[in-house]
Amino acid sequence: MKSVRNVIILGSGCAGNTAAIYAGRAGLNPLVIIGHEPGGQLSITTDVENFPGFPDGIQGPDLVANMQKQAERFGAEYVYGTVDAADLSKRPFRISIDGEWQETRTLIIASGASARWLGLPNEQQLIGKGVSSCATCDGAFYKEKKIMVIGGGDSAMEEATFLTRFGSEVSLVHRRDEFRASKIMLDRAKANPKIKWLVNTAVDDIFDVTKGEVTGVKLRNLKTGHVWDQEVDGFFLAIGHIPNTKPFVGQIDLDPDGYILSKGGARTNVTGVFHAGDVQDRIYRQAITAAGAGCMAAIEVERFLEHQGH
Ligand code: NAP
């Protein structure tokens, strides 16, 4: 077992990196576990136009790489690996990183929520080239283009409605003809004449990997079996997110979907364990809000350790 760390930060997205900058500057030598999606959601985005301070925008991967560089300048240490087990029953906490146990006085969980994908063969290759899981991030790239949104929940309604500001048309594809979305969100979307509804419909394929961009999809009516191709420029998944909290099930309070339940500020129900970013936030989910949450978590860690005499 290595020496006890002051703080371990799980996740290397905006939340984790910002926590690392603050904890590093506070002299806490944070250890950042990079996780299974290095750089988090931004690493699978292209242009980021809404992060303050970059009037001409910045590439998502560059933004997170800059953050990491900034944190390393202040002594943050980054290790590749994922957390496969944890013992939060007493302090110091014990965290297993790919089977290797490490002790820490405090923990910041900034492990994010991974977008759920359809699992189609071409989908992953076209992420950032027409396939997106974030309308707020990427909608503006599809002005006067053909947009498709997949899903039947609040996110799908919200994103389809939002995307009508940009697209020449927005098709909403849902696998059933009943919607999980709340009535108010569904009614708002239904009242929008720019949204075309394709219910009982599944997406079988996305084209065109050889061109390196989305040009269309193959759709299938699940009731009739009818299969057809449709031209699409922007393909937006809104089929939910999966918070990365598996190692903490039964150890910290989570909501029924697995998101961390906040006890206010960046606190979880376990003293010394803090949250930051999408692992707790299912509403805003933005780079800037995650960065702000990472800052809050690091400040709480600093005060907690000071109070404990470290
Ligand atoms: P969600 O409510 O879980 O809905 C996911 C949707 O995706 C469902 O319609 C589901 O279809 C569909 N889906 C899931 N897997 C699929 C697959 N493999 N293929 C095709 N379709 C699939 O997720 P969400 O819309 O992201 O919402 C999550 C939570 O955030 C909810 O509590 C929601 O109320 C909340 N939220 C609130 C707001 C707001 O109030 N402004 C905005 C966004 C989200 P089925 O229905 O057939 O299962």
Image (cartoon, grey):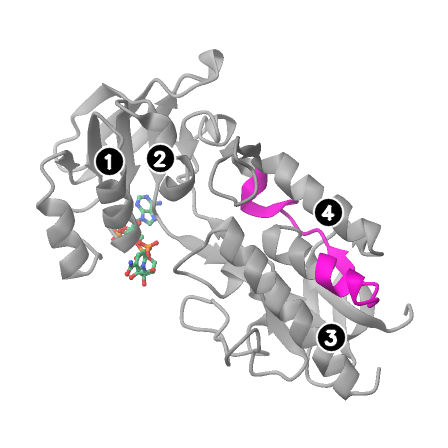
Q: Secondary structure at mark 4?
A: helix
Asked whether the residues under the numbered discs 1 and 2 touch, taking CB atoms below 8 Å apart as contact, a structural biologist would say: yes
Residue type pointed to by label 1: Arg
In space, the residues marked 1 and 3 are separated at their CA atoms by 43 Å
Q: Position of residue 289 (x, y in %)?
A: 50, 57
Residue 302: mark in rendering = 3
Disc 1 designates what residue? Answer: 165
Magenta residue span: 21-43
Residue type pointed to by label 2: Gly
For image coordinates 21% across by 32% down, the residue present is 170
In space, the residues marked 3 and 2 are separated at their CA atoms by 38 Å
Label 2 neighbour load within 10 Å: few <14, some 14-19, many 20+: many
Disc 4 designates what residue? Answer: 68
Q: Position of residue 247 (x, y in %)?
A: 62, 67
The foreground one among 161 and 205 is 161
Instruction: Specify whether 92 is left or right of 260.
Output: right
Residue type pointed to by label 3: Glu
Disc 2 designates what residue? Answer: 139
Residue type pointed to by label 4: Gln
28 falls in the magenta region = yes
Residue reaching furthest to the top: 211
Label 1 neighbour load within 10 Å: few <14, some 14-19, many 20+: some
